Image: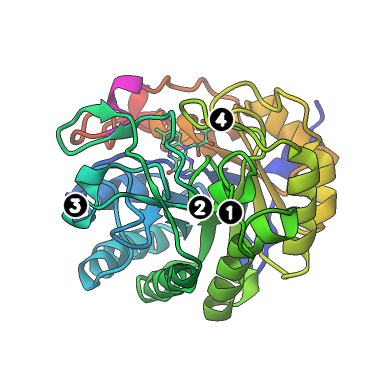
Amino acid sequence: MSTNTEARLFSPTTIGAIGVVNRVAMAPLTRSRADMEGVHSELAIEYYRQRATAWLIISEATNISREGRGYAFTPGIYTDEHVASWRRITDAVHEAGGKIVCQLWHVGRMSHVSLQENGAAPVAPSAIQADEQVFLESQTVERPSMPRALETAEIQRLVEDYRNAARRAMEAGFDGVEVHAANCYLLEQFIRDSTNKRTDQYGGPVENRTRLPIEVITAVAEVWGADRVGVRLSPITRAVGDTPLDSDPEGTYFYLAGQLGKLGLAYLHCVEGQTRGDNGAGDFDFKRLHAKFGGKYIANNSYDRQMAIDAAESGHADMVAFGRPFISNPDLVARLRLDAPLAEANRDTFYGGGAGGYTDYLPLADAA
Ligand SMILES: Cc1cc2nc3c(=O)[nH]c(=O)nc-3n(C[C@H](O)[C@H](O)[C@H](O)COP(=O)(O)O)c2cc1C
């Protein structure tokens, strides 16, 4: 490995309108430490501040509406209180020299009646219950409830919910937004023919199944300018349970990437393989997906230092996003640069709780 290859991962670039000083991003990480109204505590300010040297932080998935919520204690971006709590975080990240985009989330069928207004059924493209797990206020994990299929006439309201959340993210001082179309949540439920059995203009052929994601991304780009909007996809993940894949992942996602490429977006962010599984495992050509998109590409999923250096060097990735390593190494970029050892994250404190496993991982100097 030459010094030059190292330099590229740690060298500046631009991602749409966002200038970054290195090519290591922090992947979105749900930590389930907000209150039940989706408002962050003080701890979250410290957590994000500690990680500001990830030049680009992608926030934990953030609910665009009450209906979009599928897990207890996850943050929202649709009320004044949400905006105020995120504003303190974006200010802290900016003061520390970092940049942060907001991941916009609607879980679709991956929700539970206990998390919905008046115990309503979650909404989805089709009434097919997910064989997954959601985290409830009772601190227990349960199977998502049977969803109801959205009426065609309701779908524009969803686009408006995304648009509203995008505006709120701007008020909250983010540098941009990432539309979460990955990990088998609402937008990916529309994309895949396994979860979308609709017969209207939002179901059937791939042009129809990708209509809602494209309408949403277009609406969000009207708010922000396309060069501050990214999108996350995960063509071959089965989420945490067993969400079936599309019957033709390459055909479907190559088509979508080509359409997204026409929108002039800031970036495409891809979970390469089963989320948290081996990188790229499975039969999918992510390099070709990047080529179809034609713009900036953020690669993710079980990357280590050498893989990230190689991906930046080969041109496969413009940035590499790290998830779990950022939980336990707030100064991950410095450690990667020095090739210093990484601390292991404690899985028991991934979700919920307080400072333990959240803000108490030390940077290298203090750890030594
Ligand atoms: C605790 C935890 C929370 C996660 N939350 C999110 C999330 O909110 N949004 C999302 O798109 N992915 C989420 N992911 C997936 C990560 O962004 C990432 O794709 C995954 O951890 C693989 O990257 P890594 O090997 O670098 O950890 C989460 C993963 C973990 C471990």
Type of the residue with mark 2: Pro
Callout 1 environment at 10 Å: few (<14), some (14 to 19), or many (20+)?
many
The tag earlier along the polypeptide, 4 or 1, is: 1
Mark drawn on residue 125: 2
CA separation in Å, label 3 and label 4: 34 Å
Callout 4 environment at 10 Å: few (<14), some (14 to 19), or many (20+)?
some
Q: CB under 8 Å between callouts 1 and 3?
A: no
Q: Nearer the viewer's eye, disc 2 or disc 1? A: 1
Q: Position of residue 62 (x, y in %)?
A: 37, 54
CA separation in Å, label 2 and label 3: 37 Å
Q: Nearer the viewer, residue 200 or 94?
A: 200
Residue ID for mark 4: 238
The tag earlier along the polypeptide, 3 or 4, is: 3
Q: What residue is rendered at 60% in x and 32% in y?
A: 237
The tag earlier along the polypeptide, 2 or 3, is: 3
137 to the left or right of 336? left
Q: Nearer the viewer's eye, disc 4 or disc 1? A: 1
- Asked if disc 3 is less than 8 Å from ligand 1, the answer is no
Residue ID for mark 1: 198
Q: CB under 8 Å between callouts 4 and 2?
A: no
The magenta segment is 346-351
Give the position of the N terminus as an image quadrant.
top right
